[in-house]
Each structure stands twice: as C-alpha cells, then as structure tokens.
Image (spheres, rainbow, N blue to C red):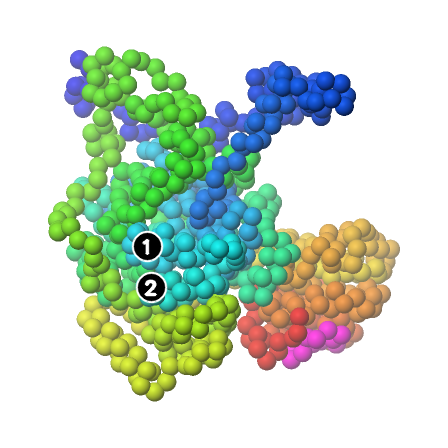
Amino acid sequence: MSKKNMPAGNQPNKTDRQVNQDSKNQQLETFREDPQEQYLTTDQGVRIADTDNSLKAGSRGPTLIEDFHFREKMTHFDHENIPERVVHARGSGAHGYFQPYDTSMSTYTKAKFLINPGLITPVFVRFSTVVGSRGSADTVRDARGFAVKFYTQEGNYDLVGNNIAPFFIQDGIKFPDLVHAIKPDPDNEMPQASAAHDTFWDFASLVPETTHMIMWVLSDRGIPRSFRMMEGFGVHTFRFINEEGKGRFVKFHWRPLLGTHSLVWDEAQKIAGKDPDWLRRDLWDAIEKGNYPEYELAVQIVEEEDEHAFAFDLLDATKIIPEELVPLQPIGKMTLNRNPDNFFAETEQVAFHPGNLVPGIDVTNDPLLQGRLFSYLDTQLNRFTSANFAEVPINKPVCPVHNHQQNGFMRQTINKGKANYFPNSLGGGCPMMAPEAMGGYMHYMEKVEGHKIRERSESFKDHYTQASLFYHSMTEVEKKHILEAAHFELGKVESEAVRQRMIENFAHVDLEFAQKVAEGVGIDPPTGNVAETIKNTVSALKEKLSTRKNVTDSPALSMEKNKKPVLKGLKVAILAAKGVDVAQVKAITEALKAEGVESEVVAKFLGMLKGADGAELKVDKSHITTASIMYDAVLVPGGKESVEAMKKQGDALHFLNEAFKHCKTIAALAEGVELLEASDIKGVKLASAKKGNLTADKGVVTSGSGVDVNAFTTSFLEQLSQFRHWSREQKDMVPA
C-alpha cells in the first residue's frame, strides 16, 4: 500500500516539525564561509599564488587569454549584481525571533506560530524606503517598508507591510501609474528619492483616493527617527481561520517598545548630507551593542457578520480601522538580535511575497492585495532570472521542502527518485498530499459570485473622511508639521494647475488647512461660493456615513498624544575642549550608560583632551565629522578653560543653537552654563554658573557648580526621556 492510500491514523506525523530560535541560524551556518587563516583560491578550490598581476607575454606585454584566474575573477565581478527592486530598493535587514504571549489567539487562528507561547519562531526583517534607489539617503520623506519573514514549522509566512497604515491606491492595476509618477522624471531622472515634483502631485491631484496616505506621509511619520522607533502595519485586511474553519477579518500592527518617534524636517535634510546611512547605521549599531529592537505584534479582529457595519469598506486599502472602534489585541513580541553576515546574500537577496501564507491565515478580496499576489512573485522572477530564488539560503524555509519543481537556472536541490510528477505509482505516490488534519493548507471557503466588470464598489468612493479624521486627530504641533511639509512638497511643483487641484483636494480634508497651504504655495485659497460648496459636500458625506460605525476623533493616530518616555538607545553629545572637568564627564556618562543612553565626546579635533585636573578624556567625534543632528541631546560639562575655548568656536555654538532649534534636550553644568549664555538660546531660565540651583525649563537643564551631579543627571534624564520639547518650537526659535 502506498503512503498516499494509508489511513490517516497510520500516516507519519509531520504536523509538528521542530523549529526554534536558532533553526535559521543553524541552517545558514551550512552556507557560511570564513576566510580567516585560509589561502586564496579560485571558485574551483585551486590555491592562487598571485592575484595582483594578470598573466602577460612579458612584463609589458598583452594579457594572455589562458589566464583562467583573471577570466574567472573578472567574469564573476561583471555579473555579481542583480537588478535592484523597483520600489523598496534601499533596505536594511536584521535577524531575530518572534514569540506569542499566550494561547488566546487559538480562538481565531490555527497558525501555530501565533498561538503556542512555547514556540519561538526565527524571523528576518527588512526595513526600507520606497521611492529611492539603493544609493539614496535614508532620511528622505517617504513611506517605509516593514517586511517580516517568519520561518515557521509550517513553512515561510511573509507579513509585508509599511510604517503607514493606509496606502495610496485602492486597486493594484493603478500601481504602475503610482510608481511611474512618484519615481524620478523619465526625461531627466530627477529628483531622486522624493515625491516633491510635478509628476507625483499631478497624479495625486487627479486621483483623490491618494489623499489619506498623503496626509500620513506629510506628517512626522514620513521621517522616522529610527527603525527601532517606527510602527509597522500590514496595510490590508487579511483573514484568520481557526481549527473549526470559521473565518474573521484581521489587521496586523507592529508597535515598537521604544515608542514612535520622528526627526524634524530640517534635521532629516541635513542628516541626508552628513550621514545618508543614518537609519541603517542606527539599526546595525543598536544590535551590535545589545540594544535589541523590540516590537509588539497586535491585531484588530472583526467578525464576518460585521463586514459591512463600518462607514468604510474593510477591503479598501486606503482606509484604516480606527482603534477606538476595534481595539488592538497584543499577541506576541518580536526581538531583533543579530545583524546579517553579508548584506547582499541576506538583505539584498531576501524575497518577500504576501502570498507566502501558512494554515490559519488567508487573503481577502482587497483589489490592491490581489494585485500584489501576482506582482511580488513576478518581480522576484525578474530580479533572480530564475524560479529557484526560494533556494537562496535567506529565503529557504527551515522546514522540509518536497515537491516536483525541478531544474532551472542555478538549481541547488538534488532531487532523488524517478517520479517527478503527480500522481505517480513509481515513487510510491510521494511526495503525497497532506489532508487538513496533517497540516495541509486549505483556502477559506468563501462564497464568491458576480458579473465580470471593471468597476469600483460604491463603498470605495469616500476619499476624504479618513484623511480628515487623521488631520483632526493631530496635536497643533503635528498639524503645523503637516502644513510645513505641504509647503515644501507643493512648493517644488512648477505647474500652477497641479497646485490648484491639490488645494481643492485638501479643502475636502479641512478648509482652513487648505487655505494655509494655498497661502504658502502661491495659490488663491478657496473662498466664497467655492468654500461653501466644499463645506456642503463634506457635510453631506458625513451625514451619509453617520448611520455606520465611525469616529470623528482618533487619538490613537497621534504620535504626540501617545508619546511615551524613551531613553534606551538615545545618543548624547558632550561638547568639550582642553580643560574640561573630566570627573564630571565620567560620572554623567556612567549614569547615562546605566539607563541605556549612549554618549560621545565631541571636540574640535580627535585625540585626547587633558582635563583641568590633568586627567585625560578621549574624543569620539570632531566637529567636522559630526553635528547636533546626529544626537538626541547635548551636554556641556564644566571646566573654565574648556568653556572659554568653546566660546570662540563657531562650530560649538552652532551645535547648541541647532539642537535648541530642533527642540532637543540641552544640559549644562557649572561653567558650561556660560556657553549657553554665549549662544543664541533665549527664552529659557538658566541657572547661575557659580551658585545657581538646578533648573529645568523647556527641556534645558542647568545647574551651578554647587549642585550634586547625581541630581543634575536625574533631571537631565527626565527631560531627555521626553525626546522633543515642542513648547519652544516657535517663539524661542533660534537661527541655525
């Protein structure tokens, strides 16, 4: 009897394939190569005596074609690149693991990696910008990719999302148009990694469904401080299926345990020039130092009978489910604890696909998701020029793979046996199909019927309500940043007609906001009959949707309203010169380190600084190699000679002014207060350098020489944990 025909009870138990946190690492170890203490060889293993000189006919003669080492080396170099991704080209990757909290999700899904708290699943995560090429900067205003590959015991599961919850478009057929519009202009290949040009805003102004995501991108979420401080969203509505076959709708959310924090726009632009690798360096360094990024996975679950209960369509990717309507349920935590060994082999070659599913998770009829199910697989075939990309080590599942896929470019698997087809008797009917009880994947049995038609559902035609909800849920500071971003983006648009159309779109979001944007980009604001018509249209739309589940305010959307204190992984710059109080610096840096806060000494030149008492202090960065934009706070320690020297250093004064402008925490101790007094920092209370008591005003902490260093450091850490101090953003602004 073949295995295929065995009674289910007699079949080998293949449902619990062993996977642990180290499964992927152990698998990758098979493919690693370490050159330490090894001789250089050709690809065939022949040792090489000279790789500096090609084989020639005489020392000044022509290179000979028989030089097999030259030909192999050069040929490999000529072919070592693969096409970069059309979108998400610039990425950063990390290994880690995911562990569920408890078994509570077993009510909703049978996906083992989500319901067994004793099961630790290895993951690989790739963060990315969307628009720019591989060589572009990290800190551009853009959406960020947040893609997670789970190496589960049931096969690979890919959750391929973004750091922004809605998407630009509703139907996958519009994706080529969106990307063509947002990419550099085809005639001159400019601008790089930016939406601030005519073609994108022309498209957006003509496709109002983009409005909701545009509001998110213009917000502070478009310029994250760190991948470690960035939310992730599955974007689409997916489906959970439990053991009984019951389905429910689900939205996925990643929430960073450090909270969600962003750069300011001036800072983001300057970092792009000073260190275009800012976000990938931050991620790499944090993991190397043991400050492992952590993210909580949470879900929103909607019963099938509530599919049409909301004032929006669950299948519309330009919409979110407000958390006030369906609260998040935390279900597990992901920790990133290991950097890749090789960027190309892992981060560049990792291949994601939203159709990589495991039992218990399925897709929905979201037309954007349906388009991605085709596009992602097709893209990988183009990048790898082979259907065998799943055999690349980083993409290889940790569970066994058995099928009849064979041959093709660079096939790695050596398939045994005579029967490479199904059904077969010559191979004993193997590999055999698995019934659902043995872990076989079963699609959700959804009833689908309808006429073939190119049309959008009527429920997809509200393009402004959630954009308005997002804007009105922001704090005044966040609204101001959205306005400034709109001024920058539309200010780069040369076509007045395009700017005019965008103002009309924004007027449906908020009339006053549209008028302020218009003022900044040289367009007449909507007034009179135009404004009245827009008001009536918006009012009628709200009335139409009022009978369904909806909210008019969603505090969960605001980063500021949900801000939580953060210290771990922040960086402090300590400004110093010869004569600095070394004992002060060492005491403070030790206290910062105890809280997970990094610090670096910044001075005019690299080397060692001799302190006031003769002790020495190592300089980590010079003014020419760094700037305040690379740090979360600035500290000026005491030391009369040190402070007097820095009063004459324009770089040191600019360092303080710029940090103050960007609303960062600033601290000064003893004579260090005098450097603040010499800067352009105004409008805050400063302690006297000699006898003043400890003061903390609008994120500026100062104390005189008589104050206890521990008390000073405690106050500094308290202010630092607030990350930004927006109360001084306007009236106390300084030139920098």
Q: Residue at x 73, y 68 (%)?
A: 653
Q: Is residue 214 left or right of residue 95?
A: left
Res 174 label: 1
Q: Residue at x 35, y 26 (%)?
A: 400
Q: Residue at x 42, y 61 (%)?
A: 200
As for residue 681 lying within the magenta part, the answer is: yes
As for residue 121 lying within the magenta part, the answer is: no
Query: From mark 1 to mark 2, how far is it between C-alphas?
Result: 10 Å
**Secondary element type, mark 1:** helix
| Residue type at the position of mark 2 | Val
* Residue lying at the far bottom of the rendered structure: 528
| Residue behind mark 2 | 207
**Secondary element type, mark 2:** loop
Report the span colored magenta: 677-688
Q: Quadrant of the N terminus?
A: top left
| Residue closest to the eye, 138 or 262 | 138
